[in-house]
Image (cartoon, rainbow, N blue to C red):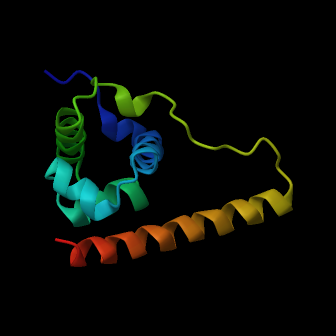
Amino acid sequence: MMTTNFFEHRDAVAQNMIALMRKNGYSRQTFSKLTAVPRPAVDQLLLSGGENINESVFNSYILQINQAFDLHENYFLTTKEIAKSSSTSSVNNEQSERVKELYFGLDCIMDIYSMYIR
């Protein structure tokens, strides 16, 4: 029985899901296949914080992911290995945005690659 409303913690869930995917080397396509969460829903969970998914569906997807990887219920609510910059200088903020862009590009390349590997 679910006691946590993950929808209220969408940003933390998205960041921790990204951390899990990076740690294990999963592309969004691979993550979708492993969890049986539709690929467009994975995008919604990661990129827009699930804002286009209703609350009950969002919560059911998180529970489905938890079950697929045998994670405890609050796994995505705890802080994971997310690199956070302690500096607030504009150089570090720009670099952080650039790194995000590069990770996004790499993820897209991995998605395309995963479609051709069978």
In the orientation shown, which residue stands out farthest toward the front? 118
* Image x and y of residue 19, in percent: 47, 45
* Image x and y of residue 31, in percent: 27, 54
Q: Is residue 1 above or below residue 98?
A: above
Left or right placement of residue 43 versus residue 36 in this view: right
Q: How many labels, in total?
A: 0
* Image x and y of residue 38, in percent: 17, 60
Left or right placement of residue 77 versus residue 93 in this view: left
Q: Residue at x 58, y 70 (%)?
A: 101
Q: Residue at x 40, y 73 (%)?
A: 108
Examine the rendering and report whether any part of residue 52 can be seen.
Answer: no
Q: Nearer the viewer, residue 66 or 106?
A: 106
Q: Nearer the viewer, residue 100 or 51?
A: 100
Answer with the quarter of the image where residue 66 lies: top left
Q: Is residue 2 above or below residue 23?
A: above
Q: Residue at x 19, y 50 (%)?
A: 34
